[in-house]
Image (cartoon, rainbow, N blue to C red):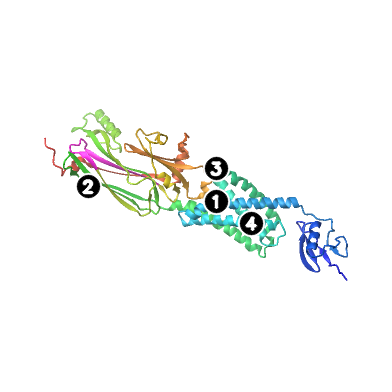
Amino acid sequence: MNIRPWVVVETPDDRGLRRVTVGGKAAGSVWSLRELRRLLERLGHPDVDVEDPASVCWHGEDSTTWPDRPFRRRATMVVMAVGLLVSGFLNAIIGWPDASNALTFAQRIVGAGLVLSGVVQVAGAVLALDHWGRREYKASGAIVLLGVFIALATDSLLFLLWLEEKEVTPYLFAFVPLGCWAVWAFVLLIREKAWKGLPHPGRFVAGFYATALLSAVSLAYSTLYQPATAPLRFSLNAEFGRARQDRSKPFVHVPLKFSVKNTGDVSVYVIVNDVSVYGRTASYSLLGNSSKEASARAWEESFRSSEDGEAERHVDRLSYKRLSSARLYEPGNVLEAGQEDTFVRVFQIPRDVPYDLIYVDMQFTYMRKDRGRIDVERYGKPYESWRHPRFACRVCDADTLTYHGRVRHNNNLVNVTRAPLYVTAFWSPIAKPVYSISSFHFTGGWIDDAAEERELKKFGISTRHATTEVSVAELLRFIPAAPR
């Protein structure tokens, strides 16, 4: 005798899913009458009459009640999964440069955290299929909620960083729509109480907030506190050596010893550097100026003609002529913390030189390495103005070497919210170095001086000077006078 199984269909849950029991054993859940028939067919009972009360018992509602909205449910599932996938890839793309190449350990941790959060979001995208499906995994809703919260936090942070400058970048068209999606998804999951399937939801919430707090503290430490507190000190020195007479020519060779030491705790990029030697000429007066009015004019003239703001009563009409120019480092070189270098250069002056003083000016412009990164491979290759006219210096009168390369913040979260920035430096043997940092890329754009000044401060770009001078009489004291 063929005995039909006793089939029980439970009341629809809050999502419209009805649990099915066959012969006292759980057989699964179904969304519709069609799915019920397919389930019974897979179990080997294709001939069950679902309308026969002797075969199927309907609890709560009858066979006509199927509150599931398949189109809306599947659309929500697809939008949620796609949003999590896109957000996960965005986090991984943003975090990978810091995770693999950041200067400090804290910044690498932040980058690795972004990559890991991207993995969590991809996992959430996969589990979204289960959460809006039959929910075979109890933790699927909590992981989806975690992924959405990560997206909401990341997109909010990116938007806040973008508000600082309001520059249009390609990433803007990614994180702004994702932020709107994250708000919608987060509200939806909170209303559903997506975490309620977990055995210990309180622990999940506590870990949730602890992770968010740890990430915020780590980010603030690596981007704000550490670069601001790390000291930076330099020691620059120039020293004259003993002059020597040339054996065959009426010239004197003067050695100069330069020393550069990074005595701080931060490594730096060399933006541009210059060592220039000047000869000074002046007019001398044994008596000075007798009258009060003439004396005042003499002091004023002496002060105006002095490059360092000094004035002397018996010396005026100061004039400086550049005798030698050199660079100690190639732009783009890195000077590590604690590194000390010594250089010796020799310049020549005529034996009967008309100068009274020899003046040396060292200029060293650097960028803190904990504030940003320079594309050294590009920046270290100069453009000669006589070969590349479009890279010529607009404020220089002579031929120049132009150094130009991309500069990036050390935190890639900041980079993706900013327009590309370039550091540019011009060096000429007859002019003082000029440098800039802006979005200017030799395309005819306009440089905002105020914005440029802000960027210089953000990247920690500044210049140190060191000067020294010696009298020509002191240099030539061991050199025999020229025969008359």
Which secondary structure is most common in the magenta stretch?
A: strand
How far is the residue under mark 1 from the one under mark 2?
Answer: 55 Å
Q: Is residue 429 left or right of residue 284?
A: right
- Which tag, 3 or 1, sits closer to the chain's start? 1
Where does residue 460 sit, x and y in percent of width and height?
43, 46
How far is the residue under mark 4 from the one under mark 1?
Answer: 18 Å
Residue for point 73% across, 52% down: 73
Where does residue 267 sit, x and y in percent of width and height?
40, 52
- Which tag, 2 or 4, sits closer to the chain's start? 4
Residue for point 86% across, 61% down: 49
Q: Helix, strand, or loop for circle 3?
A: loop
Q: Nearer the viewer, mark 1 or mark 2?
A: 1
Where does residue 308 sit, x and y in percent of width and height?
30, 38
> 301 or 367: nearer the eye?
367
- Dot 1 surroundings within 10 Å: few (below 14), some, or many (20 or more)? some
Residue that sits furthest to the bottom in the current view: 1
How far is the residue under mark 3 from the one under mark 1?
Answer: 15 Å
- The residue identified by callout 1 is 93
Is residue 156 visible in the rendered image? The answer is yes
- The residue identified by callout 3 is 169
Residue for point 86% across, 65% down: 55
Type of amino acid at the residue the image marks with label 2: Gly
Q: Which mark is residue 241?
A: 2
Residue 365: in magenta span: yes
